Image (spheres, helix red, strand yellow):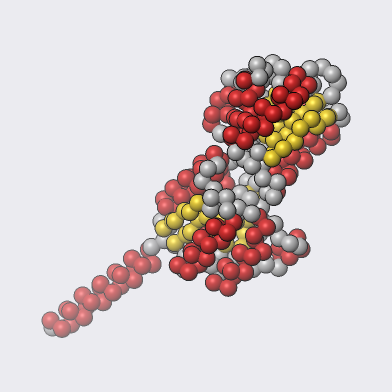
Amino acid sequence: MKKLVSVLLALVMLFGMMAFAMAEGPTIGVCIYQYNDNFMTLYREELQAYLEANGATVTVVDGKNDQAEQTNQINSFIAQGVDVLIVNFVDPTAADAIIPLCEEAGIPLVLINREPYIDNPERWDEVWEMVCYVGADARQSGTMQGQIIVDLPDQGDINGNGVVDYVMIQGDMANIDAQYRTEYSIKALTDAGIQVNKLFEQRGEWDQTKGQELAATALAQFGDLIDVIFCNNDGMALGALQSIKDAGRTVNVDIYLLGVDALSEVVELVNAGEFTGTVLNDHIGQSHKAADVALEVAAGAVPERIYVVDYVMVTRAE
């Protein structure tokens, strides 16, 4: 009888351990291109909190804006045998090298925020089925920036010379988001029949300090000729705002300023009339969708290729 009881107890413990193991969530490695980015800080913090709230074990690493560093981190996660990798590429062209590594290891790959660059667009349908991209269409964000200017009473021609003379402060031009925001913000103006003139265009690499430096250079060079400063993100726009103030200019009085991301600080400035407008890059919607997809593929689901979360135009509430 005692032997039978011991066997039953052992079976109960075994099934209990199995149930516990089955209840454990997936292990997920998250690679962020760099921590020193206003938007990606909000994104990664929300992503990690949401994943952990849904039972996942999460490790997040900083790529330090160095693709070689990030590739090493990805290889480390592969060696550890994580269940899913979520990657925000330093260099979107690295997709061609990273996808085969994950395919060989059998680890699903959820790419976020920066659309992967595949050497041949037609090959996107041929790559490993457990790879997907979760993000937004940057063409939409650029178009919305331009539309904010189109909707102004003077359509951006604040100095009244009949032309919208603009400055463009770009992100990393290897990033498709920077390319599309640069192109489509101006396309929205020209599509509306507005004459434009590019005075200055330089890369600020998404960095607030560089945005401030480039805006200062443009303002010193072109002064009152500048109608609008477009920035590919809010971080650089915040830097540009400081340079505008230092130059004795006033946003929405004698110059317009636009960003993308809708950082809380910028939204407050928009509503105070101290910033012309921004575009909500929905870090909550995007991070939750990325997390949901990662949890689904960890459970064996085959993802769709692309999941798109819409941008939202942000202007002063009247």
Q: Where is residue 152, by image quadrant?
A: top right
Query: On screen, 221 above or below 30?
Result: above
| Residue 94 coordinates in the image, percent (x, y) | 64, 60
| Residue 91 coordinates in the image, percent (x, y) | 64, 54
Q: Is residue 142 at least partly visible in the picture?
A: no
- Identify the residue at horizontal 47%, vertical 53% (top origin): 60
The C terminus lies in quadrant: top right
Query: On screen, 145 above or below 301?
Result: above
The N terminus lies in quadrant: bottom left
- Identify the residue at horizontal 73%, vertical 62% (top origin): 119
In this picture, residue 263 sits left or right of residue 167: left
- Identify the residue at horizontal 55%, vertical 57% (top origin): 70
Q: How many marks?
A: 0
In this picture, residue 139 sits left or right of residue 98: right
- Identify the residue at horizontal 59%, vertical 34% (top origin): 209
Who is closer to the viewer here, 317 or 28? 28
Q: Where is residue 302, by image quadrant?
A: bottom right
| Residue 2 coordinates in the image, percent (x, y) | 12, 81
Who is closer to the viewer here, 96 or 309? 96
| Residue 205 coordinates in the image, percent (x, y) | 64, 42
